[in-house]
Amino acid sequence: MIRIDVTRGDGTARSVTRADGDAQPIRIGRVVDNDLVLDARYLSSEHARVAWSGERFVVQDLRSTNGTVVVRRGERLKLDDSNGRQSALEDGDLLELGVPEDPVVLAVTVKEEADATHVVAVRSIDDLRPAALEIEKQPSLLRSVYESSVWIGAATELDEVLRRLGDAVLSLVQKATHVTIALRDDDDPDPKSTKVPTYVPVLTRVRGEQSAGAIPLTRSVFRKVVQERAAVLAADAPAEVGSASLLGAQIRSTLGIPLWKGEEILGILQVDNRASAATGAAGVFATPDLDLLSLLATNASLAIANARLIQRLHFAEEKARKENTFLKGREEKREGKREIIGVSKPMEELRQKLDKVVNTRVTVLIEGETGVGKELIASAVHYKSSRRDKLFVAQNCAAMPENLLESELFGHKKGSFTGATEDKRGLFELADGGTLFLDEIGEMPLSLQAKLLRALQEGEIRPVGANKPIHVNVRIVTATNRNLKKEVEEKRFREDLYYRLAVFPLRVPALRERREDIPLLAGHFLQKYAHEIGKSISGFSQQTMELLQAYDWPGNVRELENEVQRIVIQIEPGGFATPDLLSPRIRQVDSVVDRAAPKKGTLKEMMDQLEKYILIESLREHGNNKTAAARTLGITREGLHKKLRAFGIS
């Protein structure tokens, strides 16, 4: 048994005791539902716990803020990740909880209880097969074991597997009155871990009762099963029962059967006869009972291992689903819900092309200058398509060196290069079923271009260091501000990859090509940043908007957004955006009046200069379409031609 006494610090109780094999741990912390509630502001709500591992008592720090220290014969051991945040306890240990300057101190007393169990038979796991041969000579019994094994193995939920195992034991062994199953706390242990395994009773079945409380494991039998990896038969062990809830009960005989997978003991099956002493020898288990349950445990162990594996897979699947939902929600909020703003003719044409391609599987190449919003168009390709429920993953090919970019895109295996300490899934795997957007594709090294081409052609990738490919279903969308045709001619980009990527090119127009969209975009950004900063703004003055529309915006929409954000920061609450708040480059000579201002001369000369400027601007705005320009100017096409000839404009 173990006793923990508070020697320094205040608490609602000064001590707490547990018997060997008791399934209930001692919980220590500040909140009231702990077993040892300590009033110290440096302690965490759930600071530590002490539990029976099956062989000894173990203290575990529950990732507390200020830590737990075990003091043993003057030496201090801080519980951290290097020791699994736990340590076995010995008689005389001290536990220091909280800050080192003023810790709460607990004294540990551990007493070994008398071992009165008489071990009748021990059957090593390695010897279970010869024992099974004896049972095979009894067809009816063998059939019962087989039917029970099939029944247990048919269950996939862990709780159901355990329930069926308990019922099967009571059915096969008529002398059994109580069945307890204890499982290892970590069902998939790390072989390199130094963590002391802890076994927790998870099910108790009592003959003739629908439900029963947990029964402590028989300490000496349990220890022998774990240490010797053997099935154990013990008799006349009343001294082993230490739980107050079992006072008056008498264990006539006990069986301890290991549940195992490979070299690991997954758990222990404890079968008791707790009938009255008057039953005499009739209540004592025999060696055939040990062999029978050992054979059953061979198959039941596999069922338990499979059920716990399924349990882990369900947990991992649910975790992945929640992470996927979170990532999709975050990405939709960041990109997918952003509106493509613009009513100009170039933007309407872009929308029409976009609608035609979204639900196809072809690759899309988005071309345009820096800052025009290529990633926004790429996200629209994804979120308007049938792939919208999967991930949209973006990667800038110019942001990483070649070796890191390959690992980022295709993943790598542990040990494939220096620093590869674990397997990593690449963006192609993460985007499986969804869309992968590769920005600045023109910056991708030639060696990686070949691997990308294979991924596009074959639908498979090979992680760095892997010896077999992985099939993926990913839609590729790329973007560039370079002239890829010119890059191909100059041997900086693969021609075969170019034609594979440019199946359906989309060109995003520069902002100067759609000046009528500037008021809409500027108003959108003004509202966005006014809301972020929490400032009320009346809008733009007429002269300010004229200046914004007259400027050529070499940085395109991104430059406009930054300019509006700068205005919002400067403007007084409730005020209008006035020209003095604009950047100097926009205020210079870029207004309509300044750009059209004629040189000094006669009235006719200055009027001719203004008329020539207006004609040139109209042609530029309409892509040199004379019919459209004439319609806008309110004159005939012939009249426009006449004026152009007069000014020497072809």
Image: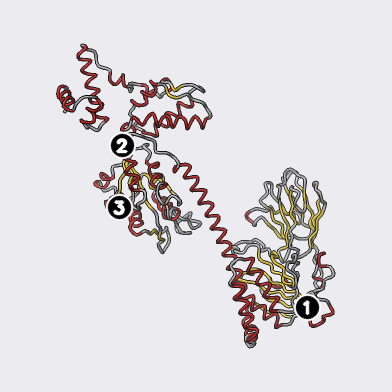
- Distance from disc 1 to disc 3, alpha carbons, whole Å, reads 78 Å
* Chain-order first, disc 1 or disc 3: 1
The answer to whether residue 274 of the structure is visible from this angle is yes
Mark 3–mark 2 CB contact (< 8 Å): no
* Chain-order first, disc 3 or disc 2: 2
- Distance from disc 3 to disc 2, alpha carbons, whole Å, reads 25 Å
Write the residue at 38% across / 42% down.
377
- Residue 434, given in percent of the width and then of the height, sits at 42, 52
Q: Amino acid at mark 3?
A: Arg
Residue carrying label 3: 500
- Distance from disc 1 to disc 2, alpha carbons, whole Å, reads 91 Å
In this rendering, position of residue 350 left or right of residue 113: left
Picture quadrant where residue 198 is located: bottom right
Quadrant containing the N terminus is: bottom right
The answer to whether residue 407 of the structure is visible from this angle is no
- Residue 17, given in percent of the width and then of the height, sits at 80, 59
* Chain-order first, disc 1 or disc 2: 1
| Residue 374 in the image: above or below residue 224 | above
Q: Amino acid at mark 2?
A: Pro
Residue carrying label 1: 235
Residue carrying label 2: 346
In this rendering, position of residue 279 left or right of residue 532: right
Nearest the viewer among 585 and 299 is 299
Mark 1–mark 3 CB contact (< 8 Å): no
Nearest the viewer among 452 and 475 is 475
Write the residue at 47% across / 44% down.
332
Q: Nearer the viewer, mark 3 or mark 2?
A: 2
Picture quadrant where residue 318 is located: bottom right
Specify few, some or many for label 3: CA neighbours under 10 Å numbering under 14, 14-19, or 20 or more: some
Write the residue at 33% across / 34% down.
344
SS for dot 2: helix
The way the protein has been coloured in the rendering is secondary structure
